[in-house]
Image: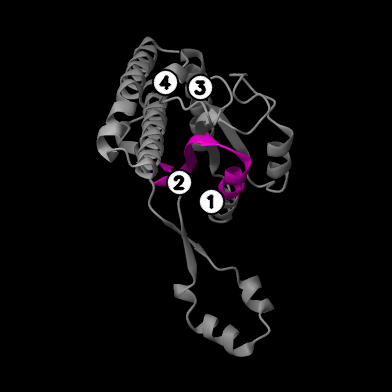
Amino acid sequence: MKIQSKKKLKELIEKYNNFMEVMESDAAKAVQDDSRAYGGFVRAAKGKMQEFITETLVRVAWDVELKGNPQDLTINSKKIRVPMQMSYVDRIKNRAIRDHILANMKSYYYGLSVDKHLFIKNKFVVGIECKAYTENAMLKRILVDFHLLKTKFPNLVCYLFQLESQLGGDYATTPHQPKGSSSTHTLMSYFPDVDLNIVTLLDGERKVDRPINKRSYFKPLNEERLENALMILVDGISGAVS
């Protein structure tokens, strides 16, 4: 790993520490003791932090490690139109409904996005879903989203980047090549077209009653895990553009 990358990762850890240190007080000020608004504020803040970490890692991977032209990389989350499958239309028994759909096919699509779409020279090569934490009910939706995207972009590289894990198994304890959990692998087995790479940034399984925005439950951002995440991105991006 290049020295410049190490410096960027240390800066990222410092920003994470500063952000987490003030999150609790910022939440209290923002919501004025409204418990429901408090929860929403904290969830949104953690989500933004995770997206910031992920996008920073992507840019370090491309700009520094792969020495790519920054202008060749575009990151967005614009909706992508997934078209209706004609095989579905063919199965519709009600002729009036079928004829109506056929006459208006241009309007039959589903707008879909994940949190980070990576385009290299205008080619969609990597999709990343960012989560403050993930449990298996949430994973089902993520797998469906990537499955739908893969119908249009079959070579898309798919990632889940999470701060904490609630998937079970060793996602939160093994930085390098975790074996995962039985329930998570079972769900993924039903989506053979989605080779989902799961990256966890904080140690220790998420505990509902131990929120990391509370100082007593704070979890440090591990440099080893950041380096591992960066190298996973480097491999994925380089493979996608080769």
Name the residue beneath numbered marker 3: 202
Q: Kindly indicate the quadrant of the structure image that contains residue 158.
A: top right
* Tag in front: 4 or 3: 3
4 and 2 marks in contact (CB < 8 Å): no
Circle 2: element type: strand
First in residue order: circle 4 vs circle 2: 4
Horizontal arrangement in the rendering, residue 19 relative to residue 184 (left or right): left
As drawn, the residue found furthest toward the bottom would be 96
First in residue order: circle 4 vs circle 3: 4
Q: Which mark is residue 153?
A: 1
Residue at the location (66% across, 78% down)?
90
Q: In this orientation, which residue lies closer to the viewer: 151 or 190? A: 190
Name the residue beneath numbered marker 2: 124
4 and 3 marks in contact (CB < 8 Å): no
First in residue order: circle 4 vs circle 1: 4
Report the span colored magenta. Answer: 114-143
131 drawn magenta: yes
As drawn, the residue found furthest toward the front would be 33
Would residue 219 be seen by someone viewing this image from the given angle? no
41 drawn magenta: no
Q: Amino acid at mark 3?
A: Leu
Mark-to-mark CA distance, 4 and 3: 23 Å
Mark-to-mark CA distance, 1 and 3: 31 Å
Q: Are there few (<14), some (14-19), or many (20+) residues within 10 Å of tag 2? A: some
Horizontal arrangement in the rendering, residue 228 relative to residue 121 (left or right): right
Name the residue beneath numbered marker 4: 65
* Tag in front: 2 or 3: 3
1 and 2 marks in contact (CB < 8 Å): yes
